[in-house]
Image (spheres, rainbow, N blue to C red):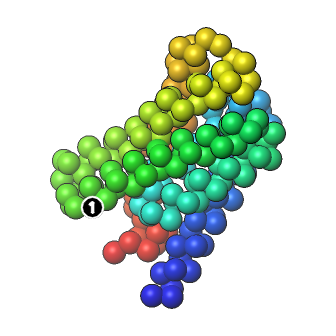
Amino acid sequence: MKNKKVLYLTQAAMIAALYVVLTMIANALGIASGNIQVRFSEALTVLPFFSPAAIPGLYIGCLIANVVTGAALPDIIFGPLATLIGAIGTWALGKAARRCGEGKKAAVCKWLSPLPPILANAVVVPPVLKYAYGIVPVWFSVITVTAGEIISCGIFGLILLFALQKYKNQLFGLE
């Protein structure tokens, strides 16, 4: 039992650290903030598919990343909440896939795993961009944020998910 707790905390901490580092790289390239956001770190939002430890790891990583990149207070509060909501949705899809085994339903869950973070960010981030940074119109932000999330989560995230699939037992302690 003690080893499971250590594994959980270690995974969460590593995911948080990776999220911060990847966001800082994207920030240095000028693509981590603003209306069009392509955060490489958002690819990590598929990790709850494998481990619930990714949920707090992503939340804390996003929180720290928003603080160190100089985000406005509403972004520091609501950005990580969007990531948390998305992570919980991805975890639920992973749980459903494990119940289904290796059949077609499990494959559908894998392909849908980036959808919760894409939707959560599409709903939460545009109002934050309006009220925290004065970026309007909101409908335009919905389009650009969603496009960035599709690139980050939908493309990079799925590449990561399928690359890690082979090593999920070793990396995440799954049986």
Residue at point 72% right, 27% down?
132
The image quadrant of residue 135 is: top right
Q: Nearer the viewer, residue 145 or 162?
A: 145
Q: According to the image, label 1 marks what residue?
A: 98
Total marks shown come to: 1
Position of residue 134 in the picture relative to residue 45 (left or right): right
Position above or below: 78 against 170 = above
Compare residues 43 and 165 and report the one nearer the observer.
Answer: 43
Q: Is residue 119 visible?
A: yes
Task: Residue at 69%, 59% (x, y): give it.
Answer: 17
The amino acid pointed to by label 1 is Arg
Tell me, yes or no, if residue 159 can be seen here.
no
State the image quarter where residue 141 is shown.
Answer: top right
Which quarter of the figure is the C terminus placed in?
bottom left
- Mark 1 lies on a secondary structure that is helix
Q: Where does residue 69 sit, x and y in percent of width and height?
A: 79, 41
> Residue at horizontal 70%, vertical 42%?
76
